[in-house]
Image: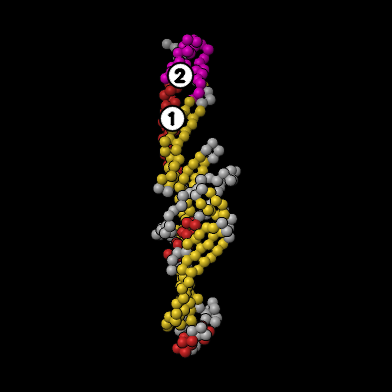
Amino acid sequence: KTSIKCDANIGTGHISASGDLSTSGGKLTLGGVKADADVGHFDPNCPGSVSGDLVDVISSLFKDHIKSKINDLVKQNLQEVVQTEAAALLSGIHWTFDLEKGIAAADFTPSTVSSSSAHLSLGVRAEIINPSSPEDPPAPKPSVPAWSTASPDAYLQAVLSAWSLDSVAYTYWKLGRLQRTITTEDVSQLTTGFVGLFAPGLLFKYPRHNMSIFSRFTEGPKAVVQPSGVVASAPATFEFNVVNETGDVIEQAFLVGTNVSLGLNFGVVTNSTGLFLT
């Protein structure tokens, strides 16, 4: 009876894993995970008293049977770990950030994923929403443009479309934030004495009363992106009211309706999907 002890050395090995990153339901998902492993070469490292033939048997046993089983186990466990940990990591990414707690939030929905030997690109569609009742602006969602080759060394490319601007105005309009009451504290001349110069009947009926103007948009403002910049417009009404000493409305004097436009100048670039702000 002879005891044999071999202190085997495993040489440099390698492991690798790959998968398909995609978007689904506004979230990132990883599928098709594949793993590979090779524990490397094997040196039995048995003591000098062990015959060469026995060392060859031990080495052959490892190479032909044990090594492949170890490789298979490593592959299987690596694949399960990558799939499980990646799913947990991706599901833990928050794409919505509060602007006003419980009122307005910026939502960045993953829409496209692409890659090459030089980069991994994630396209997100951004909009402002009411987190308690999210609602898109009443316009078709734009497609997310491809990575622009005009800035090949950039780490981030931000493209602002009219739809994203509309989401800001639409959300705040639905929340009633795009309306205001103007009083004599804002405009000291807002009295029947002054306004009556343009509406004489008002001056005779209410000779010494303050007035207020209730201004609001009747629709959510819509933006149009042009080569010269962006223009937002919406129909609005201005309700002129006669008020008492406490500011309560006594009577509506008259109503003025008009279209309100606001223009801002930005640089604009063009690609195959349209005009976009830079």
Residue at (55, 46) in percent of width and height = 148
Q: Is residue 152 visible?
A: yes
Instruction: Identify the element where label 2 is drawn.
Output: helix
**In the image shown, does 178 or 76 lie closer to the viewer?**
178
- How far across and down, in percent of the image, does residue 10 sit? 51, 23
**In the image shown, does 71 or 157 lie closer to the viewer?**
157
Q: Amino acid at mark 2?
A: Lys
**In the image shown, does 81 or 16 lie closer to the viewer?**
16
Q: Is residue 85 visible?
A: no
The 10 Å Cα crowd at callout 2, few under 14, some 14 to 19, many 20 or more, is some
- How far across and down, in percent of the image, does residue 70 sit? 43, 25
Residue at (47, 43) in percent of width and height = 113
- Is residue 167 one of those drawn in magenta? no
Q: Is residue 169 above or below residue 191?
A: above
Q: Amino acid at mark 1?
A: Lys
Residue at (42, 28) in percent of width and height = 73
Q: Quadrant of residue 264?
A: bottom right
Distance between the Cα atoms at labels 1 and 2? 17 Å
Instruction: Identify the element where label 1 is drawn.
Output: helix
**Which residue lies under the disc numbered 2?**
63
Residue at (43, 40) in percent of width and height = 30
Image quadrant in which the N terminus is located:
top left
- How far across and down, in percent of the image, does residue 218 sit? 43, 68
- Count all numbered tags in the image, as a single digit: 2
**Disc with the residue nearer the chain's start (1 vs 2):** 2
- Is residue 61 one of those drawn in magenta? yes
The 10 Å Cα crowd at callout 1, few under 14, some 14 to 19, many 20 or more, is many
Question: How does the figure colour the protein chain or chains?
Answer: secondary structure
**Which residue lies under the disc numbered 1?**
75
Magenta stretch in the rendered image: 39-65
